Image (cartoon, rainbow, N blue to C red):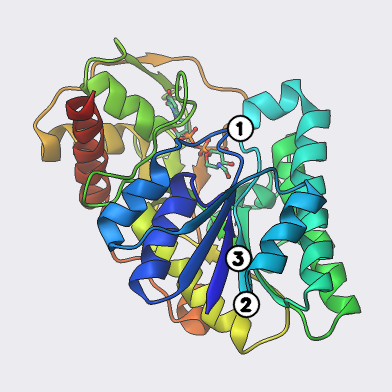
Amino acid sequence: MTILVTGGAGYIGSHTCVELQQKGYDVVIADNFFNSSLDVPERIAKITGKKPKVYQLDVADEHALELVFSANCIDAVIHFAGLKAVGESCHIPLHYYRNNLDSTLTLLETMERHNCKQLVFSSSATVYGPANESPYTEDMPTSATNPYGWTKVMIEQILRDYCTADSGFSAVLLRYFNPIGAHESGLLGDDPNGIPNNLMPFVARVAAGQLPELTVFGNDYPTRDGTCLRDYIHVVDLAKGHLSALSYAASHTGAEAFNLGTGEGVSVLELINTFERVNEVSVPHRIGERREGDLADVYADPSRARNELHWVAEKTVEDMCRDSWHFIQTRMAEQ
Ligand code: WQD
């Protein structure tokens, strides 16, 4: 089977391409490399012994995408491509709506022309918004507090409506919690351009001496140590969840959402302390003000994915911290 992976050179996309190729799928990557390195396909090849076919394009470019579908017999699509920075989306909302919605609509129109009826969509726990409480379940109403989150809510709705119109279409909506960690080889990992927004890449760069200090955004939340709880999930577990979703899409129709999380909340200080302990490093940090929009606790009820996708996260927070540290050390050794 041939799988088109949009955004396949990105953090989660590249780890998913590794799992796909190791399971015998043929992989075609469509990526504009806006938020990924051009050498990622070679790194995927180093790990798996096979280089995916790569098209450098904007998924919203209908002519470019048509060429991909005309040149390859695409059986299913995993759609990662999209802008994903919460804070940035508040400053340039039109760019986020245009980019994330146009690329999805162009993809669906192209899939329709080529009778491709299986899609796995990269959604997010952010669709649970502020109104629901952890542990989140897939039947809860969705909303958002930022344009990025709204694009995920809207795309889920587009896919539900499309599945209503085409009863033969299958859309699996994967709601990620907090993906962290890296491939055990150290060749792939979370390597954002500039100053990281997210916790783990920031922790790793402070530990590596690339950044002076981590600010913990508040320790006055109603949690066991006052810092926010999040459901951190190893990116390789997350990648494997996409293969389970592909299998589900091949034997079901309609739009179905699944939480990909561990079901456990880990605090910011617990993550820092685990990182220091397993890697025997120091992460200088200070307690600062709360970050606007942060919720006290965000973690999944992952039982639907366990029961229907037959998928469970297996790696520990220690694994996530160890692999993240190995990745940044590998990157530093390469420079
Ligand atoms: C985790 C915790 C921060 C940085 C985001 C997006 C979400 C999803 C995953 C796309 C929070 C604290 C962080 C720092 C800190 N992305 N923190 N100091 O906000 O849970 O989720 O990424 O779908 O949509 O919102 O992840 O890693 O930014 O923060 O104290 O320098 O770490 O306050 O409690 P978040 P995060």
Please determine whether, in this image, residue 91 is positioned above or below residue 171.
above
Task: Give the labeled residue for mark 1.
Answer: 85
- Counting from the top left corner in percent of width and height, residue 218 is at 45, 22
Amino acid marked by disc 2: Asp
Q: Quarter of the image containing the C terminus?
A: top left
Please determine whether, in this image, residue 93 is positioned above or below residue 300.
above
Image quadrant in which you'd find residue 79: bottom right
Q: Confirm if mark 2 falls within 8 A of ligand 1.
A: no
In this picture, residue 136 sits left or right of residue 128: left
Element at label 1: loop
- The local crowd at label 1, few if under 14, some if 14 to 19, many if 20 or more residues have their Cα within 10 Å, is some
Element at label 2: loop
Alpha carbon separation for disc pair 2 and 3: 30 Å
**Nearer to the camera, 215 or 37:** 37
- Counting from the top left corner in percent of width and height, residue 270 is at 28, 38
Element at label 3: loop
- Counting from the top left corner in percent of width and height, residue 310 is at 44, 81
**Nearer to the camera, 90 or 264:** 90
**Nearer to the camera, 188 or 59:** 59
Task: Give the labeled residue for mark 2.
Answer: 75
Amino acid marked by disc 3: Thr
Residue 298 visible to the viewer: yes
In this picture, residue 129 sits left or right of residue 223: right
Task: Give the labeled residue for mark 3.
Answer: 137
Mark 2 or 1, closer to the camera: 2
Q: Residue at x 27, y 40 (%)?
A: 324
Q: Residue at x 73, y 34 (%)?
A: 146
- Counting from the top left corner in percent of width and height, residue 156 is at 75, 60
Amino acid marked by disc 1: Ala
